C-alpha cells in the first residue's frame, strides 16, 4: 500500500504542475489587456514599468509562467491585482473556511440522509413510499439549480421571512460589534471541529464493538459528549454567541438548498447500487442461513453499495469550490466560489490561478483517497493489491 501511495504521489505532482501550467496559459489567453486594466495609462512610462514589475506583469508570458511556477513551489502565489498589496494566500485563507463550512455541512447532511434512505427504499421496494420518494428524488436531481435556489429564497426569505435573503452576516448587528466576522467564524469552526472529531471517533469505536448494546452505549456517550462540549464551549462565550448565531442563521438556507439537491442524487445512487447488490449470491446465501434482515441490509448489502456512494462523496468534496460559484453568487455568500468568479471576470490572474490550483490539489487528493477507501471497504481490492 505504501509503495502504491508513493507512486501515486509522484504521478499527482507531475499532473498538478501540468494542470497549473494549463490554467496559467488559459487565463493569460483571455481577451483584453491586463496591464491596461490594472495599470493607469496616464502615469509616466518609467513608473508604469515599476508597477508592472511589482505586479509580475513585465516580461514575456513564458517568463511570467516560469516565475509563477518557481514561486509557487516556495509557497508564494503572488499578490492580488484587485486587492493589492494583499497576498493571494491571505485572500484565499480568508475565503476558503466559509466555503468549506457551507459545502461540508450540506454534503454531509445530504450523503448521510441519502444513503440511509436509499438503502431502505431498495430493501422495501414496491410500496407507495418508495415510488413517491423516488419520483421526488428524480425531480430534485433534475431541477435547474439556480432557479431552485431563487425559489427557496422567494419562499423562505422574502415570503415567510424565516431567513435572511443573502449575505454572510447582518451589517446592522455588526456595526458596533467588539469582534470581527472572521474572529467569530473561526471560533465557530473550532467548536464544530472539536465536536466532529469526537463524533467521528465515536462512530469508529462503536463499529468495532461486537455487542449491539455496547455499541449503542458508546454512541450515546460519544454523541452526548460531542453535543455537551459544543454547548459548553458557547456557554463560556456569551458575548460572542449572538454574532455566531447570526452567521449560522445566514448559512441555514444555502445549506438546506444544497442538501436537497445533493441528497436526491445520493439517494438515487444508493438505491440503484443496493438493487444491484441484492441480486448477488452471497445475499441469497445469508438469507438462507437465517441471518437477520437488518444485518443483511446493513452489513452485507449496504457495505458494497457504499463504494460508488463514497466515490461520489469524496469527489464531490473536491469540487466544492467550482460548485460554489452558483450557490455563493445566488446567496451572496463571500466564499471561494464568488472569489473565483470575481477574479476571473476582473482578470486577477494570481487569485484565479491560486483558487483553481486549490481545486486541482483537492481533486488529486480526492482520487487518492478514493483508491485507499476502496481498498479498505472492499476486501477483494485489498487481496488483489497484496498479491
Image: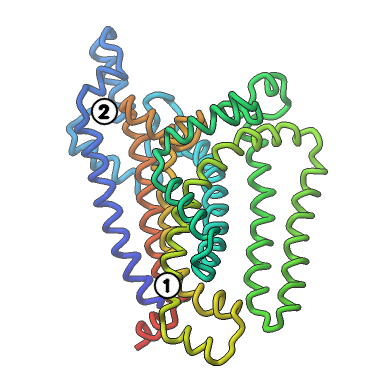
The structure residue drawn at horizontal position 76% and vertical position 36%, both measured from the top left corner, is 241
Instruction: Give the position of the C terminus as an image quadrant.
Output: bottom left
Residue 374, disc? 1
Residue 164, image x, y percentages: 61, 27
Which of the two residues, 225 or 343, is positioned nearer the viewer here?
225
The structure residue drawn at horizontal position 54% and vertical position 38%, both measured from the top left corner, is 254
User: Is residue 87 depicted above or below 118 in this figure?
Assistant: above
For residue 346, say whether it is visible.
yes
Which of the two residues, 145 or 10, is positioned nearer the viewer here?
145
- Taking the image as shown, residue 365 lies to the left or right of residue 335, namely left
Residue 280, image x, y percentages: 41, 82
User: Is residue 138 depicted above or below 162 in this figure?
Assistant: below
Which of the two residues, 108 or 382, is positioned nearer the viewer here?
108
Alpha-carbon neighbours of circle 2 within 10 Å: few (<14), some, or many (≥20)?
some
Q: Which residue is mark 2?
A: 57
Q: How is the image coloured?
A: rainbow
Residue 174, image x, y percentages: 68, 23
Amino acid at each position: 500500500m505504501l509503495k502504491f501511495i508513493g507512486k501515486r504521489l509522484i504521478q499527482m505532482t507531475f499532473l498538478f504542475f501540468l494542470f497549473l501550467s494549463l490554467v496559467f496559459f488559459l487565463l493569460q489567453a483571455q481577451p483584453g489587456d491586463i496591464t491596461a486594466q490594472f495599470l493607469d495609462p496616464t502615469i509616466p512610462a518609467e513608473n508604469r514599468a515599476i508597477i508592472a514589475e511589482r505586479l509580475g506583469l513585465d516580461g514575456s508570458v513564458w517568463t511570467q509562467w516560469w516565475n509563477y511556477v518557481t514561486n509557487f513551489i516556495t509557497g508564494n502565489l503572488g499578490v492580488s491585482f484587485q486587492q493589492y498589496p494583499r497576498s493571494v494566500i491571505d485572500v484565499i485563507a480568508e475565503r476558503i473556511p466559509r466555503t468549506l463550512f457551507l459545502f461540508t455541512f450540506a454534503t454531509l447532511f445530504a450523503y448521510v440522509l441519502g444513503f440511509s434512505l436509499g438503502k431502505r427504499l431498495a430493501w422495501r421496494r414496491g410500496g407507495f413510499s418508495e415510488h413517491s420518494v423516488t419520483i421526488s428524488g428524480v425531480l430534485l436531481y433534475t431541477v435547474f439549480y439556480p432557479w431552485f435556489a431563487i425559489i427557496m429564497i422567494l419562499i423562505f426569505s422574502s415570503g415567510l421571512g424565516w431567513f435572511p435573503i443573502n449575505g454572510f452576516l447582518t451589517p446592522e448587528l455588526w456595526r458596533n460589534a467588539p469582534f470581527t466576522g472572521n474572529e467569530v467564524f473561526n471560533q465557530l469552526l473550532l467548536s464544530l471541529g472539536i465536536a466532529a472529531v469526537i463524533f467521528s471517533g465515536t462512530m469508529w469505536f462503536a463499529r468495532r464493538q461486537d455487542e449491539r448494546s455496547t455499541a449503542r452505549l458508546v454512541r450515546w456517550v460519544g454523541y452526548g459528549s460531542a453535543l455537551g462540549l459544543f454547548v459548553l464551549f458557547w456557554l463560556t462565550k456569551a458575548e460572542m454567541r449572538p454574532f455566531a448565531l447570526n452567521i449560522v442563521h445566514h448559512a441555514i438556507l444555502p445549506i438546506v438548498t444544497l442538501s436537497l439537491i445533493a441528497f436526491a442524487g445520493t439517494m438515487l445512487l444508493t438505491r440503484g447500487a443496493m438493487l444491484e447488490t441484492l441480486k448477488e449470491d452471497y445475499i441469497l446465501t445469508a438469507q438462507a442461513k437465517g441471518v437477520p434482515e437488518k444485518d443483511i441490509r446493513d452489513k452485507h448489502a449496504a457495505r458494497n453499495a457504499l463504494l460508488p456512494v463514497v466515490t461520489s462523496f469524496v469527489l464531490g468534496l473536491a469540487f466544492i469550490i467550482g460548485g460554489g460559484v452558483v450557490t455563493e453568487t445566488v446567496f451572496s455568500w463571500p466564499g471561494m466560489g464568488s472569489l473565483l468568479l470575481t477574479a476571473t471576470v476582473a482578470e486577477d490572474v494570481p487569485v484565479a490561478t491560486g483558487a483553481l490550483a486549490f481545486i486541482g490539489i483537492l481533486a488529486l487528493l480526492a482520487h487518492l483517497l478514493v483508491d485507499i477507501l476502496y481498498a479498505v471497504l472492499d476486501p477483494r481490492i485489498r487481496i488483489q493489491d497484496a498479491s
